[in-house]
Image (spheres, rainbow, N blue to C red):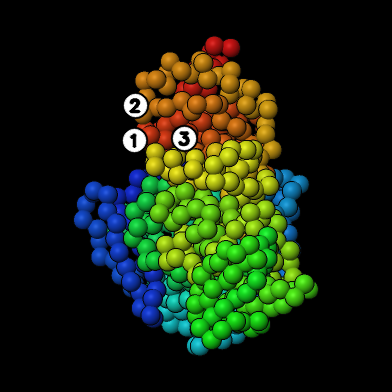
Amino acid sequence: MSRRGSVLALSVLMAAQASAATLDVAWRQDGATRVVQLRDGGAAPRKFDGSRAVPLGSLWKLFVYVYAVDTRTPLPDFRCTGRDPEEVYCCDAGQTVERDAALAQSCGLFFAPRRLMLAAPAWRDYWMKRLGAAPAGELAWLADPARLEPGREVRLDSLLRVLASVSPASRAEAESALLRVVLDGRGADTVRWFGSQLRVKTFSWHERDGAVRQRLGGAAGWLADGTPVWFAGEGASAGILRQWAPRLAAALPPARPEDSGCVMVDYFARYPVRSVRGADGDVTAGALNGRHLVTFENGNSLAVRSGGELWVERGSDGRPQVRGRLGVNEYVARVIDREGSAREPEAGKALAIAARSYLQQNARLVAGCQQIADSSARQRVSPNPATPEALALARWTDQLVVDGVSVRYHRDTPAADTLVWTQAVTQARQGRRFDELLAAAYPAGSLAVVGNSGTRCQRLARNEAWLAAALPRWRRQLVREAGYEAPATPPIVCELASGAPYSEQSRNRIFMRPLATREDRITLAHEYLHIGLRQHPRGQDEQYVERLARRLVDINLETL
């Protein structure tokens, strides 16, 4: 991911330090701060615990967001005029940005307390109720919204304590916005490591370590079950996320998100039921608890287990009908058990997201629940409780869907916009991750969050044509770079609505603005290099990539 325009010089300075030797990670559980340090060579790390003073950075925007949501403070869209350099984090001149995009993109102008007319007394009263004490002492930094400045240093365990105090309702809204960070924000392409488990606001600032002033990048927010988390290392947040994602994901405590939403399932929609029999005889109506045998009119029978989530009612034809009420993740897990298997985790993750997407696109909303039939024409759903392995996959992908296409899947028959289970298993065994499986099955789709659409691709034909013409001239230079692998097909170039240009390496896509200047051409070369050098030892070193991109564009100009 790169920065352009007025922030280019700053981005190069930040990127020069993107190779952090240590990542400090902290979370709060059972009222205590727990820490771990991840190392990648370098000198022995300094002492790290909850008493460490850390810069607030852009995390102040997150506290304004949750306050405004909880108190129903109006959050009008912010319109960019083109006159303020900080608008690069918000939108293009003449465009607007709404609250969730502003949070994910770190648009400080949107959340400015003066713009939102935040009153200090009401602010203090709110946080006193949330924390059970006045924001004083170690929490004094939270006493006045006007003093929430990026350079303000706060005690780490007090920061985690405030995150733990956020109400579930406002946290859920913030998390929906922050999930975009690992999809197409500063953590683009790290979703393969985190799934939906990491819901954080990124920050990049600086701190003083003795006499040395160093760049500090990281993020803070919550895990999927509401556990407050913070992590940071030397460098910028985008570089930190990409460099440390696999090890950070492994180091974080496991999260088990609550099963939100409800799904009403009409079981055995295509197979008329003759009887449902339990230990005490036939069940003609009411909840099912324990083991039962369902016998169909065709003479077949099926053993089912239920803890009350299934029940029997009489249909209009007098036959018994079996219905179920499930949480969304339980539903998705039962689809995995019925349509695929949790024994192939990456393929199972892809199927979980496909099943959740299909549910969102095809279920009817009845009395606040999604209603769908259990049938081969819809989705087949196991009538038995989900296996722990399938439920873990459903929770790990909680809220993730494919947006932009009509999602289908099949066991073994290929078709357009269809995840084929047997193919997904084969590809997963060859080392492909779930996001790559979804990209292959739904090339026009994008990973998104339920209720929060993904970044759809409006292709920039002129940008793609310029890149296609430039690549042959660049090849002689690029084959000398260790680890360079030309993508099988030239990347798709999509129009960027706001924020900084970036590349989706797993999907072979670049998001940027239309070509207009030399800097735009350098941007395109820069993001292409992130894709071509993804196996290069310095492929995420922004300073190295920027220098090479400029050389390539100069080669192109000399040729022309």
Res 196 visible: no
Residue 336 position in % (x across, y down): 51, 57
Q: Which residue is mark 1?
A: 537
- Pointer 2 or 1: first along the chain: 2
* Distance between the alpha carbons at the discs numbered 2 and 1: 8 Å
Name the residue: 25% across, 61% down: 46
Query: Which residue is nearer to you in this view: 87 or 280?
Result: 280
Q: Quadrant of the C terminus?
A: top right
Residue 20 position in % (x across, y down): 34, 49
- Local crowd size for mark 1, using a 10 Å CA cut-off: few (<14), some (14–19), many (≥20): few
Q: Is 484 above or below relative to 95?
A: above
Query: Which residue is nearer to you in this view: 449 or 362?
Result: 362
**Mark 2 residue element:** loop
Q: Which residue is mark 2?
A: 482
Q: Is 94 above or below relative to 471?
A: below
Name the residue: 35% across, 74% down: 33
**Amino acid carrying mark 1 in the image:** Pro
Q: Along the horizontal axis of the image, is 517 left or right of 7?
A: right
Q: Which residue is mark 3?
A: 530
**Mark 1 residue element:** loop
Q: Is 326 above or below relative to 203?
A: below
* Distance between the alpha carbons at the discs numbered 1 and 3: 11 Å
Residue 207 position in % (x across, y down): 38, 59
Residue extending farthest top: 559
- Pointer 1 or 3: first along the chain: 3
- Pointer 3 or 2: first along the chain: 2
- Local crowd size for mark 2, using a 10 Å CA cut-off: few (<14), some (14–19), many (≥20): few
Name the residue: 68% across, 75% down: 320
The answer to whether marks 2 and 1 mark residues whose Cβ atoms lie closer than 8 Å is yes
